[in-house]
Image: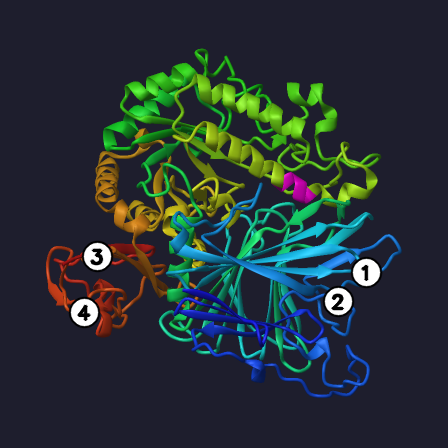
């Protein structure tokens, strides 16, 4: 692993044997991009990659030099208005109204390991030898603003972490209107853009489009990363699949408003930018103050999207997630929400927990409705004290009763929200986001607390800490159930209102950080009405996230498949819910509900007492299966085999690190009549090992990968008496052992 600087040619070369990243100081002192991709040999000069030709209608940097125009150069952190007309990475408004800036190279440092980002989530190195960090200092001498670009190259992964920090070293107030985490100029546009879109209950559906001249982007303006789009995109060469071809993945470690943009100019160069959404963003940078962007991670692979995904999985699972639960298999839980909603008593909850314990469940989670005047979703939020009518002994006694059954106890919070019908709102009506003189819009009958204010965060912290200190709580589900509207903070002056949304997210991170530090034993699971804030920023504090409110086994195939392109299975909260499914009214078989949920952090969202004895027996088998294989599932290597976006079948698999155990999930949506014989080619196995399939037939790894695993069922012809019937919404998990 090396971060090299060639003084004579002013060239940087970051390489770890897997990737190379090349930059150069340009003639005007700014920083230019030369190459990003598969590792190449180092040399003193890569100046031949800096192509400059006179082009009509170009504005040029130097008088008399028609060749050097920033419009036609690949740049590292571009600005607008000094001969470059593309979208910039940074924008500054000055007291005289000017928006022009020019950052020139000053110096650089190389340090072992990776420094953290104060108040922000970030990847990390546990040992200095795991990575190296290059920090390049650029400066605008007129504005007296320094720009510090940070690049961390990881030793064992084709990944680069990037961020930027701006420091106002002058004597005037400035306003930062754009501050992207990453900008990458590519020499051509021969890519497909892939992003993951959706809405509540159908999150992260894969969308593919060819790059064209112009701008293509996804973003959030909702105050959170959102159900609509995810802060993750890919650029792949046409023809790239799971196992071959070139692809780059761009991921933002941030939970607020974001922008992911690909701009193709008339000469087919491509600019990728990723960071805080400039829309509505305006950060006052007073003298002596600095601004740190969130971190972005880019991964390059020449072996297809599967290889890229496994690089993200490894990085985020082991060097983004933190704490006692990072490397531990997650407990099998049962959540009472779909079993009871608001209709419960302490005894009713204990009855549900007792049945779950009999079947092997390890953790009981009490969801919404345990606090304040919370008899519906119109009251109680903000008052984090037990409701004595439902819990006469408080959370403490309920937790003790659950613990006495031999189970752990978990609790639901929605700390960022408040109802008008609450003691907190009546005491502090100015603590919500609301614009003076305007109507305050409601979502789920609730308002958003102003987490940009320290006193608000302090209050919620004290309330939550009191509960978590008094009761034996092993798990917290942190929910967030509405987007931001009428965004305005009563605590900030007019010229700082453009900071509210970012300050809000910093407040969320602050509360997470305080709670996880004080209660390191608690497993936190983030949630935002399902998948509304499923992003890497959350994984830094909570190693798993509720993936979607739609837990139907059929719908979840697309949701979990799309999620897997960036996020590890250990982060994917997946449950078996009641039928008819509460989102789609579908009667999905219990086996398929479990076979999909198995590829995540497994649990149940129903009342086991309402199941038949036969179904209870299935549940016990499912739980025993998960206890045997969850280590492999949550921490093994994941491979996508058949896409639910391309046909009637879905298949994926997980392989243990030693490649001696593998589990293959196979799913069918609608049944066939007299269908073809079917097989699935597996991945990741040891070709020389002999694997038993479901304890029966034996096959070498190379056969299973090159010929395939037979998945034909009785729908391929006339069903025989000794064959199980094929059906809609069918599934099977194949267990391979060597």
Which residue appears at 60% of the width and 33% of the height?
A: 416
- Determine which residue is flagged by label 4: 687
Q: Position of residue 716 (x, y in %)?
A: 23, 68
Alpha carbon distance from label 4 to label 2 = 53 Å
Q: Main secondary structure of the magenta part?
A: helix
Badge number at residue 80: 2
Alpha carbon distance from label 2 to label 3 = 51 Å
Alpha carbon distance from label 4 to label 1 = 60 Å
Q: Is residue 386 left or right of residue 673?
A: right
> In which quadrant of the rendered view does residue 41 lie?
bottom left
Badge 2 density bin: few <14, some 14–19, many ≥20, Cα 10 Å = some
Q: Nearer the viewer, residue 366 or 42?
A: 42
Please tell me whether residue 400 is drawn above or below residue 655 in the rendered image.
above
- Determine which residue is flagged by label 3: 658
Q: Position of residue 247 (x, y in %)?
A: 46, 70
- The mark that comes first in sequence, 3 or 4, is 3
Question: What range is drawn magenta here?
Answer: 501-505
């Amino acid at each position: 692993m090396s971060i090299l600087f060639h003084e004579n040619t002013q060239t940087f070369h970051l390489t770890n044997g897997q990737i190379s990243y090349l930059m150069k100081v340009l003639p005007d002192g700014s920083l230019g991009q030369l190459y990003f991709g598969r590792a190449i040999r180092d040399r003193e000069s890569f100046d031949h990659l800096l192509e400059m030709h006179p082009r009509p209608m170009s504005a040029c940097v130097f008088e008399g030099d028609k060749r050097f125009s920033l419009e036609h150069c690949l740049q590292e952190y571009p600005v607008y208005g000094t001969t470059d007309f593309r979208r910039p990475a940074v924008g500054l408004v000055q007291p005289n109204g000017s928006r022009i800036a020019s950052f020139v190279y000053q110096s650089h440092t190389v340090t072992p390991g990776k420094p953290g980002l104060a108040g922000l989530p970030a990847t990390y190195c546990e040992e200095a030898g795991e990575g190296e960090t290059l920090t390049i200092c650029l400066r605008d001498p007129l504005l007296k603003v320094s720009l510090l670009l940070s690049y961390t190259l990881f030793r064992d992964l084709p990944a680069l972490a990037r961020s930027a920090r701006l420091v106002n070293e002058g004597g005037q107030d400035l306003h930062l209107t754009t501050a992207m985490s990453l900008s990458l100029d590519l020499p051509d546009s021969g890519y497909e853009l892939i992003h993951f879109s959706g809405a509540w209950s159908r999150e992260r559906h894969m969308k593919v489009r060819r790059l064209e001249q112009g701008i293509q982007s996804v973003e959030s303006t909702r105050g959170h990363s959102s159900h609509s789009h995810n802060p993750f995109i890919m650029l792949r060469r046409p023809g790239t699949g799971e196992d071959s071809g070139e692809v780059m993945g761009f991921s933002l470690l941030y939970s607020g408003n974001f922008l992911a943009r690909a701009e193709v100019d008339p000469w087919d160069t491509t600019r990728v930018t990723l960071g805080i959404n400039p829309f509505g963003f305006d950060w006052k940078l007073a003298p002596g103050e600095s601004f740190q962007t969130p971190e972005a991670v880019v991964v390059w692979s020449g072996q297809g999207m599967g290889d890229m995904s496994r690089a993200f999985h490894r990085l985020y699972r082991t060097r983004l997630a933190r704490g006692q639960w990072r490397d531990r298999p997650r407990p099998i839980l049962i959540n009472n929400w779909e079993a009871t909603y608001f209709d419960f008593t302490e005894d009713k909850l204990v009855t549900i927990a007792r049945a779950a314990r009999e079947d092997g469940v390890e953790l009981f989670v009490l969801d919404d409705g345990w606090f304040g005047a919370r008899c519906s979703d119109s009251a109680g939020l903000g008052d984090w004290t037990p409701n004595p009518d439902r819990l006469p002994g408080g959370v403490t006694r309920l937790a003790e009763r659950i613990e006495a059954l031999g189970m752990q106890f978990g609790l639901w919070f929605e700390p960022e929200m408040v109802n008008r019908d609450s003691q907190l709102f009546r005491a502090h009506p100015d603590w919500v986001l609301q614009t003076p003189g305007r109507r305050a819009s409601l979502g789920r009958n609730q308002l958003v607390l102003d987490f940009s204010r320290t006193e608000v965060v302090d209050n919620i912290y004290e309330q939550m800490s009191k509960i978590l200190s008094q009761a034996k709580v092993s798990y917290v589900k942190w929910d967030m159930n509405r987007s931001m509207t009428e965004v305005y903070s009563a605590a900030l002056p007019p010229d700082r209102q453009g900071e509210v949304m970012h300050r809000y997210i910093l407040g969320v991170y602050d509360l997470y950080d305080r709670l996880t530090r004080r209660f390191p034993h608690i497993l936190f699971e983030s949630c935002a009405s399902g998948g509304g804030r499923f992003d890497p920023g959350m994984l830094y504090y909570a190693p798993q996230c509720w993936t979607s409110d739609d837990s139907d086994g059929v719908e979840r195939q697309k949701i979990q498949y799309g999620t897997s392109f960036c996020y590890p299975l250990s982060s994917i909260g997946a449950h078996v819910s009641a039928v008819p499914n509460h989102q789609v009214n579908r009667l999905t078989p219990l086996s398929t509900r479990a076979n999909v949920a198995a590829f995540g952090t497994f649990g149940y969202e129903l009342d086991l007492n309402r199941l038949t004895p036969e179904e209870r027996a299935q549940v016990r088998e499912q739980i025993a299966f998960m206890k045997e294989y969850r280590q492999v599932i949550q921490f093994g290597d994941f491979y996508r085999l058949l896409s639910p976006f391309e046909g009637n079948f879905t298949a994926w698999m997980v392989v243990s690190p030693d490649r001696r155990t593998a589990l293959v999930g196979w799913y069918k949506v609608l049944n066939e009549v007299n269908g073809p014989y079917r097989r699935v080619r597996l991945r990741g196995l040891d070709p020389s090992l002999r694997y038993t399939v479901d304890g029966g037939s034996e096959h070498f790894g190379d056969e299973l990968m090159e010929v395939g695993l037979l998945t034909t069922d009785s729908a391929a012809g006339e069903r025989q008496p000794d064959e199980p019937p094929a059906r809609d919404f069918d599934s099977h998990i194949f267990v391979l052992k060597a």
